[in-house]
Image (cartoon, rainbow, N blue to C red):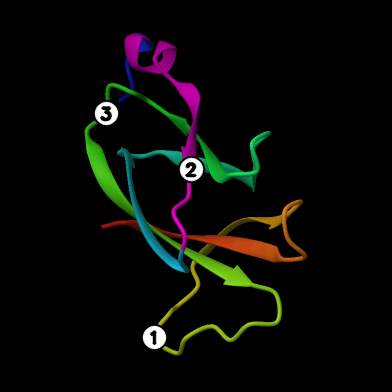
Amino acid sequence: MESNGDRMSRTIYKYPLPDGLEITILMPQHAQLLYIAEDPSLVVCVWAEINPNELLVKRSLFVAMTGHMIPPHVTLTKYVGSCVLKSEPIVLHLYDQGEV
């Protein structure tokens, strides 16, 4: 059960996404992915509601591009959102593959 102190510790963090389609990033356990977009400096990021007191775990993400094939070994799980890039004529679609 979550204590009052844990609830008070929740915040929104921004995580820049590295290049690639199959991505693993570190973030606190039980993070809830909220939004994908380019930030003001045109870096593609995902925003997540996190508790910074939780242990860091690896999170697997998949980025699909409109009109591009999804590799057969990739099973798309939880859809997070789509992002129309300002820097290029590309639309990205982010899927959360869960903690690994």
Query: Of label 1 and label 2, which has the lower sequence position?
Result: 2
Which mark lies nearer to you, 1 or 2?
2
x and y, in percent, of residue 41 in the image: 64, 36
Query: Of label 3 and label 2, which has the lower sequence position?
Result: 2
Q: Which residue is mark 3?
A: 54
Left or right of 41, for residue 14:
left
Q: Residue, x 48% and y 21% (percent of image)?
A: 11
Which mark lies nearer to you, 3 or 2?
2
- Looking at the figure, which quarter contains the C terminus? bottom left
Q: Which residue is mark 2?
A: 16
Query: Of label 3 and label 1, which has the lower sequence position?
Result: 3
Give the quarter of the image for residue 3. Answer: top left
What distance separates the C-alpha of mark 1 from that of mark 2?
A: 25 Å
Q: Residue, x 24% and y 37% (percent of image)?
A: 56
Foreground residue among 67 and 11: 67
Q: Are marks 1 and 2 in contact (CB under 8 Å)?
A: no
- Looking at the figure, which quarter contains the N terminus? top left
Give the quarter of the image for residue 79. Answer: bottom right
Question: Range of the magenta residues?
Answer: 5-19
The amino acid at mark 3 is Glu
The amino acid at mark 2 is Pro
Q: Are marks 3 and 1 in contact (CB under 8 Å)?
A: no
Q: Residue, x 63% and y 63% (percent of image)?
A: 93
Q: Are marks 3 and 2 in contact (CB under 8 Å)?
A: no
The amino acid at mark 1 is His
Residue 53 vertical placement versus 72 (above, below): above
The circle drawn on residue 73 is 1
x and y, in percent, of residue 4 in the image: 37, 10
